[in-house]
Amino acid sequence: MADKHQYETRAERRAADAANRRGGAHRAVSSAGSHKAATAVVIVLALVAVLLIVGAVNIIRSAGSDPEAKVEEQQQKEPGAGDDAKDKSSQSGEPGESTQSESTPSDGESTGGGVTTVEAESGDPNLSILNASGVNGAARKFADQYEAQGWKMGRVSNAGTRVSSTTVYYSSSEYSDAAERVAEGLGGVSVEQSRRYQVGVTILMGPDVADSDPAEG
């Protein structure tokens, strides 16, 4: 009986050991699976974070990359710089436009001729002149002439930049006819539509026009 009891005890012990080994193996497999799942979650979260950062950087770059807006902002800061001074309040009926003046050129300063300033017509927008020629007083000289011919003057000042030839810009298609007439009077200079200049017609004056003495057209 003792031997039989001892035999049964050993068999039970071996069965228990086998059960424990199976349980340990199952726990090891479960632990490995849990570890892999946690690693996958961390990787996915890291990728999402990287994509969010890249998207935010692109949005910031896009928001600050409008060159025309930068040029307009620079021009709004330019009045009073260089050899031109403010001496005239705005005559514009449209918001955001201010009229500034240049010093009057001395006798003999202008050397050219054949350029005319056309008369304003009913419905014409404000006319601005930005001197980008380097010729002192050119914008003021032409502004006085245009004003005498019925134009409502907007901004009259230095442009803060230099160009080699004159261009007439208009902000909206409804002002294209007025811009064409102004450009024709200035010797057939270029005409372009641009949102850089927000109101009416703007003459960006180069030396080809600035050196001329304007005559009434």
Image (cartoon, rainbow, N blue to C red):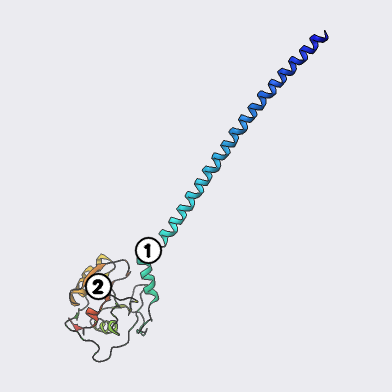
Front residue of 119 and 185: 185
Picture quarter with the C terminus: bottom left
Q: Considering only vertical position in the picture, is 63 above or below 20?
A: below
For marks 1 and 2 on the same chain, the one whose residue lies earlier in the sequence: 1
Front residue of 191 and 128: 191
Q: Which residue is mark 2?
A: 167
Residue 72: quadrant of the picture: bottom left
Q: Position of residue 47 (x, y in %)?
A: 50, 46
Q: Which residue is mark 1?
A: 66
Residue farthest toward the front in the current orientation of the protein: 3
Residue farthest toward the top in the current orientation of the protein: 1
Q: Considering only vertical position in the picture, is 12 above or below 44?
A: above
Picture quarter with the N terminus: top right
Please give left or right for residue 144 compared with residue 54 in the image: left
Q: Secondary structure at mark 1?
A: loop
Q: Position of residue 210 (x, y in %)?
A: 24, 81
Q: Amino acid at mark 2?
A: Thr
